[in-house]
Image: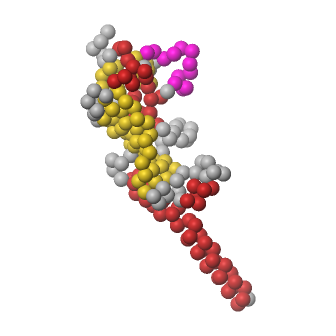
Amino acid sequence: MKNFLTVVGGISIILLIFYSIFFWDYHVSKYLFKQYCEEEGRVGVFIYEKVALPNEYFIPFPKDKDPRYLPRMFVIADNVMIRESILKKDFTINIKKKNIVSKIGPVYSYTTTVVRRLDGKVISKAVSLGNKKGWVIRYLSKAFPSSGIECPNRVDKNGISLPNYDHSDVVNQAFFKNKDEN
């Protein structure tokens, strides 16, 4: 019985060492990621200026398409969309630029910005974070591609994740239709 306990103790220590070597960054990255996500002002949608656009920037919803499949970023109000081609003449939309926040994990910051071409001013931006959860998880993600988490994590009424929700709002919350025009 004493030999059995010695063997079980030895195996437990070996497993603990193995786990510590291969999964330490998983736990550290989860802790760092949680801290970054809870830091006020780090993630979300930031609207610095709301811009009124004239009528030529807008089109009605295409009648032959289901509204659920229209690009959410350019949907402003019921039955109205921004014409992407006209908007991009006056504004630059930089979608999900990736920057590393922490090499442990690694943890990335994804930033989408809308910049007015005339003066280079940032009108709005959306920032989200992504955690790849350690090198072993990243290696295994080739076999299991759904690894990694993002914040803020928005879900729809059915509980389905909406990972680009904030990045879509960076446009449709920054612009509105000028009511003074006919």
Task: Name the residue: 27% across, 14% down.
Answer: 180
- Left or right: where 131 falls relative to 173: right
Please, is residue 108 above or below residue 68 in the view?
Answer: below
Q: Quadrant of residue 161?
A: top right
**Percent position (x, y) of residue 50?**
30, 29
**Percent position (x, y) of residue 179?**
30, 16
Is residue 23 highlighted in magenta?
no
User: What range is drawn magenta here?
Assistant: 59-70
In the rendered image, is residue 173 in sight?
Answer: no
**Percent position (x, y) of residue 13?**
61, 79
- Left or right: where 58 falls relative to 6: left
Q: Residue furthest bottom?
A: 2
**Percent position (x, y) of residue 131?**
49, 53
- Left or right: where 178 falls relative to 62: left
Is residue 65 highlighted in magenta?
yes
Given residues 170 and 77, the one toward you in this image is 170
Please, is residue 121 above or below residue 17 in the view?
Answer: above
Looking at the rendered image, the quarter that the C terminus falls into is top left
